Image (tube, rainbow, N blue to C red):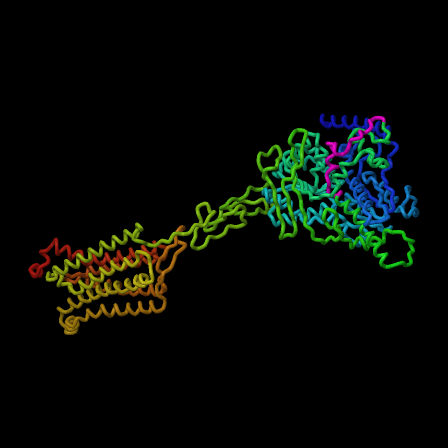
Amino acid sequence: MSFPLLCLFVLLQSSFTSMEVMHHSCFECWQQPNTYMKADIILGAFIPIYRTLEAPFTNIFDSDPRTLWELFLPKWRNYLYLLTLYFAIGQINKDTQLLPNVTLGFHVYNAFNSNKRTLEGLLMLMSGIREYVPNYKCKTQHKALEIISGTKSEFSAAIGTLSELYKVPQVTYGPFDSMLSDKDTFPTLYQMSPKDRALTQGLISLLLHFGWKWLGVIVSDDGIGREFLSDLTVKIGSEDICMAFTEKLSDNSKYRIIYDYGLLNLYQHIQVNVILFYGNMDDLVISLPYIKKFLRRKVWIMAKQHLTYLESTFNDRNFWIYAFRGSFSFSKRRSIPGFKHFLEALTPSQYPGDSYFSKFWVDNFDCSPLGFLCEKFKPCPANISLKTGDEINDVMTTSEPSYSIWNAVYAVPHALHKMLLTKTEMGPMDDRNKGEILPWQLHPFLRKIKVTNAAGDEISFDENKNVMETYDIQNFIAYSKQNSLILKVGEFVFKSPQDQGFFINEVLIQWPSNFNQTPQSVCTQSCGPGFWKVLQEERPICCFSCVFCPEWHISNQTDQQECSACLSQDYPNPERNQCLPKAVTFLSFEDPLGMALACTALFFSVSTVIVLGIFLKHRESAIVKANNKTLSYILLISILFCFLCSFFFIGRPNTVSCILQQITFALVFTLAISTVLAKTITVILAFRIVKPGRTMRRLFVSGIYNAVIPICVLIQLILSGVWLGTSPPYIDTDIHSEHAHVIILCNKGSATAFYCVLAYLGTLALGSFTVAFLVRNLPDTFNEAKFLTFSMLVFLSVWVTFIPVYQSTKGKAMVAVEVFSILASSAGLLVCIFFPKCYIIFLRPNKNSLRHLKNKN
């Protein structure tokens, strides 16, 4: 046995010795477990006033740890209930309008005693005698008209069956229990406390305010605790709050926390900083000394008004103050008008016939009231009152059960008043009871009672009544090692699920000593912006993994369930937490690629003009004349237009430029290729004319080769017309090619029409290449068939390569590929056909003369 526990046992042993001596010397004369106030109408009440020992202890080490610890629980914590009864009955008896000529009294039994003695007290209340004799009733006028009971539902249910036999109304002042609302089982039972419709919602609001998503829950293992746990489980599920563990405290299980060190070790390793408690505080307090190391690292949320209990119990104990420092409590705002003044005015001689009242002053003020013989204590001073006591805060604080007792007492005279008025209105009738008021006569009036008390609240037993609930959120603050206080730090107001308000002042809150700031209680740290939650299999919803948002998706909030896609005109930033608008772009002249292509097109255009000028200047030279200078001029002009049409592809697209791009490209290239075809036909006819036969000569002389150009251009013109008539090119946007840009470009409209145009050009080029290839070796000084063959080979190579490259590129690159193909194929025609002739004109002028031609022949 550890040394601290041994010290505790020695302390308890010495306490028992002194208590036993005092027990035999002072209190032997008033050990009856009840108190009585004579009146015309008696109310029975079961109140846990004072703890008494059934038998003295001889050896503390043989005692149950639970019994040992209960000795240190506050004996007078519930004495406020009896004082509330005194106050309420005193007010009613002073009211001449409510029950004129009728006095109200009570017979109170101490419900802290054993079940056997409690049952005896119940039978005495039912039978109206001081000693119970089975199957016997006397003194009917002193029989209890109503029974007030119930700090615990089990107690109320246990006496409910017996009260039903006597048809005595039973009003409970404990928490609302759905089990007791079953009228088939408890037809004579009425619950004074309304149903807590908003408690769980207020607790969830507190949890959400501080971001506590991972908590432990301890509840009492009874109907109220199970109903609370069920309601809490349903509501926190929709808010992504999880329970790390749940513990139900019952007579058989509440000591498992004390002795099951494996379970305690599990609790210590669970990363939960918040524990919610709903149940009987005594059950939790009994277990506290054994788990104090575990307690001091947690924030406790008491779902009932328990902090007042803690303050009155542990006000002078350093451990308990720091164990519950920073705890929160939800308590309904209750106030009984005039009750505080009544308490402050109480004196020791107020109720001389009440032995509990006398013992209360002995225990709390160490003095003996007048007329109460006890040699160990001095007489109480004349000016002493509850107002001067510093250690009875629990007695001076209005609790919810005391407020319910006040209402329960007031319900009876109002029901009696209604009943008497009804009898008066009905007139004299055959009264078998000879004017007596029987308990069963009160039921119809209790069920329908609806009155407003002095506090402005409605007294009613309607379980479905809609009332505004206000909860004060209190914080347990330790301002020194030996002193503490309860401070209101917020409130929760509930009218309906759609009309509720939550307020808390974080500046006033004191947290447990091991937290320097607002504590966190989560299973997994929150997923920040840019991430989304991925739930883990077989784990609570609060335990998840954080995954970076996929491409084109963002999350701009914490703990998003999924990432949201950006709009088509937006793109996500690198952190994936914001969608940014895409910049509009196109292949412009300011763009490096556009500038390079434009400069290239301009260079070759100038080069073509220069070549055309050279040919015009040397139009009488042999090399210009020998290759049909007219076709050469047409070809140079068409090549010039081919270079210039590339400018339609550079710059911001518009409807006109989109149409001109494709139509100009198709026509000028058709003109160029058809001119090359005409040149190859000219070469064939020129060589065939020297051979016998009039047919070739007539064809050559008639200029049939000149008809090739308009026929080919006409066919392309028809194809282009069909293209424009069915699906013309239009302005389009590309939002996918570049991450941060929207590309404006021209859509071909009909891809089939575009590839038909290319196919036609390819057919012309292939025909020209075939004819030129066949006549490449014909003997002639100025035979350009070889140059035409090579130029067509370059042209075909460029456009055959263009098709797969064009298909695999997007955006500006696709436009650049098309422009590059136009420039490359046009440059191939210019360089392969005309640069060799320019070479001869400038560098080998001796070959460009008829004398050279004749000498060669």
Give percent across and percent down for residue 798.
28, 57
Give percent across and percent down for residue 590.
30, 51
Q: Give residue 831's quadrant in the image.
A: bottom left
The residues colored magenta run 375-402
Q: Residue at x 66, y 29 (%)?
A: 481
Q: Residue furthest front?
A: 96
Is residue 391 shown in magenta?
A: yes
Give percent across and percent down for residue 300.
65, 38
* Image position of 76 (left or right of 619): right
Say which of 616 and 93 sits in front. Answer: 93
Quarter of the image with the N terminus is top right
Is residue 335 shown in magenta?
A: no
Say which of 780 and 41 sits in front. Answer: 41
Say which of 365 and 527 sits in front. Answer: 365
Labels in figure, total: 0
Q: Give residue 334's quadrant in the image.
A: top right
Q: Residue at x 77, y 45 (%)?
A: 406
Q: Is residue 810 visible?
A: no
Q: Is residue 841 visible?
A: yes
Q: Give residue 107's quadrant in the image.
A: top right
* Image position of 354 (left or right of 315): right
Give percent across and percent down for residue 716.
28, 67
Q: Compared with residue 161, is residue 361 higher up or lower down, i.e. above or below?
A: above
* Image position of 621 (left or right of 93): left
Q: Compared with residue 274, is residue 100 higher up or lower down, i.e. above or below?
A: below
Say which of 789 and 444 sits in front. Answer: 444
Quarter of the image with the C terminus is bottom left
